Image (spheres, rainbow, N blue to C red):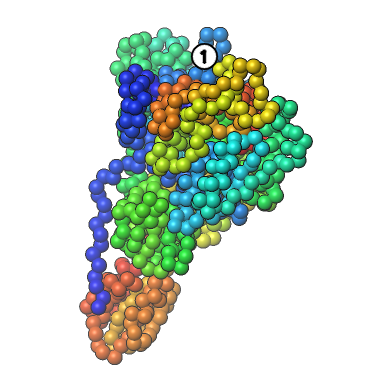
Amino acid sequence: MALHNSAWAIEEDPLLSARDGAEVRVEELLAAERSKDLLRFSTAGSVDDGKSTLIGRLLYDSNNVYDDHVASVTRGSAIDFAQLTDGLRAEREQGITIDVAYRYFSTPKRKFIIADTPGHEQYTRNMATGASTADVAVVLVDARKGILDQTRRHACIAALLGIPAVIAAINKMDLVDFSEEVFEQHRRDLLTLASVLEIPELIAIPVSALAGDNVVHRSTRTPWYSGPSLLELLETIPLAAQRSQGNFRLPVQRVIRPDQDFRGFAGQIASGSVRPGDEIVALPSEVRSRVRSITTWDGDLAEAHAPQSVVLTLDDEADISRGDMIASLSAPPQRTSRLSATVVWMHSSPLRPGTSFLLKHTTQMVRARVVEIRSRIDIERLESLAADRLPLNAIGEILIETHRPLVADLYRENRFTGSFILIDPADNATAGAGMIRAFEGGFRPALSGALVTLGNRSALAHNLEKRLLEQGALVVRTRFSNRDALLPLVLTGATVLHESDNGGAISVIGHGSEVIASDIPDDPDAILGVLDNATHLPSGKHA
Amino acid sequence: MATALIDAPASTSAISPLSHIRQLEAESIHILREVASEFQKPVMLYSIGKDSSVMLRLAQKAFYPAPIPFSLLHIDTGYKFREMLEFRDRYTTELGLKLIVWRNEEALANGANPVALGTRRCCGLLKTQALLDGLRAHGFDAAFGGARRDEEKSRAKERIFSFRDSAGQWDPKSQRPELWNLFNGTIHPGESIRVFPLSNWTELDVWHYIHLEKIPIVPLYFAKERRMLVRGDSLIPVEQEFVRGLPGEEQWVRCRLRSLGCSPCTGAIRSDADTVPKIIAELMAMRNSERANRVIDHDQDGSMELKKREGYF
């Protein structure tokens, strides 16, 4: 459906009519094309809000529809804008939109992906689907009716799924004589709703999708409105903080091993950036290493950032496999097997406590049990209710335990490492979509490894060994003379207590031979304190 | 001997966002890797067209420096352009890929062709049936296709991981929700998933990428003088015996193919575009969609959706 002729005004470009100039001009246009950023937005509206009409109008007035598509939905001289987007036969027969549809268009300023989602109550799951990747939500409000339950539902889902900005298109303004009072009343109600839902930004625009007012072109029939048209706003609204600015996270998809000499870890960077030499930690094993190379088909990179797909090689031989996460050592994710989450329920059989599922989080699949349903959100009244089950399209807070720990972030900090889906093990359906709200503790992370040089202090070594064993650590106490040969043990997470005959200083060394602390006093508490700081990752006990 | 390391400072400089086309590339590579890792026996449907060419390049990138860990499957209807088959054999050999070619030999032996059967039945036998048989015969549990959501209205609603029941059929009303980048590829034995790594690409993106990456494509995409049957606005390639026009209808026309299918059912367009940049320039000025020249999509209202329900890509 992408058509770019009028937007780029190339038909009027004399260079393009001359064939030799065309290639030069195309290079310029493609360079301009590559400099555009990408905005993903979701739309949601009720059955009669005119959402399909609005999308059709947006595409048509911005010259993003092909002639044969227009011709196929034109009856007499009238274009049925809704028909431009209603794709399935059943939809045309029923005159409604059943399933989420994706549309693509571009203007000279931006590229857009629309997740066009249906508004009927039974299709909440599709709305959540569309919202999960959106930067902006466009919510439709019928000017004659104001805020309905549906409006609250859409705004609530946008807020829950972490969409930073909501645009409210107050539609059918032609049917209320373009009344400023009507618009202002709805706008005030919406701003109140936005503050209740903690939506950071809500902007209202008066439009008529059918007639085209303020959709692409500013209307002369709303002289009291001085703001942008819907398209102007979509073209200029700032994108939320770039994923590339967060902490580095690479969920490992696959180990790439073409031969014995190359072992790389393939994945799409979920957030942050990485460079060769960066110190990383692989989780859950807590193996530390440094990035040796960022390997791609186009050559090794000096830097890569989200959302690039890359292959990393590391300085050390590390046992890392699919489902593990490679993260920055300075700000690692949390590790937990017990968490609370908001879940959108998408299965026809209700969720009940005690039920087990497959849980897919980043690139790993684990078995998980829903321990407790803590509440159900009544998204029409925006209240939290007690509940013992969540039926299809319900949204609630649940407590989950996983059989293996997840390496994750909170959803509000990272949409990609803080989200998961629940899969019904009987019919394989995607039964629920979850957003991690808090880590519930109950999981003590293992100490990651360290080498402690103790010299000739066997009483101290004995004391430390005992106390570390009590903490559940993997301890190796040895007088083995080749200290460097012990470093691989550290890599596996062991705390190696190394004694020797010469009375050297007490120090703690990481597996990369780096000195974590030296000249530590001859005091078990001091040494344990160093180990605790140096080798514990955040335990995820706090919300 | 142990040396202290200085932590590299975290990058605080603003990083310019990844261009649209590189975002699409990264997303597609993620999809290819997920499927290769989660399924027992995936295969890539290779149609020899521009979208397949892009998908193939993305697969090379996804697993580099390892080779592509799955085979290619071409469903040969028997009526593909000769230039397509030549290109297919040369290019896949050059890249050292394993290519499986599957034909509905029984239907072809019985004389199936679009003139004799009509396009709908012909497609049903030579494409859909052949595809289902080919997938079943080899036990593939996931198949990549190069379809894009911007091609056609029913495709706009298809998931990236599109579930097919044990008969290979698509039910548009019970698709699995697809959130974030978490794909649900769990299936029972006999069921399968069709995967569309190019879902979010537009026709312009595909050409843009071919240009950037210098990806080889079938010469039929480039304009030259070709023998055509000229009927009204349609240019029908004269390659098969049963495609014969009335006196005067067969002419030499400077034209090219905008999308590649079977020669009797894929119309050409009049064009001077003989390089990729010229094709892009032409595309930008184009007023009709790429499938407007495909006879088969216009059999009846919603015909693509009907075909897809039956198992077509």
- Whether residue A512 is visible here, answered yes or no, is yes
Q: Is residue A345 left or right of residue A294?
A: right
Q: Is residue A19 left or right of residue B131?
A: left
Which residue corresponds to the image point at 32% horizontal and 26% vertical from the top-left? A21
- Local crowd at mark 1 within 10 Å, few (<14), some, or many (≥20)? some
Secondary-structure class at tag 1: strand
* Chain for disc number 1: A
Q: Nearer the viewer, residue A359 or B132?
A: B132
Q: Is residue B174 left or right of residue B217?
A: right
Q: Provide residue A25's location: percent of width, then percent of height.
A: 32, 28
Q: Residue furthest bottom?
A: A501
Against A52, residue B25 (above or below) is below
Against A316, residue A356 (above or below) is above
Q: Is residue B31 left or right of residue B208?
A: right
Q: Nearer the viewer, residue A486 or B17?
A: B17
| Residue matched to label 1 | A79
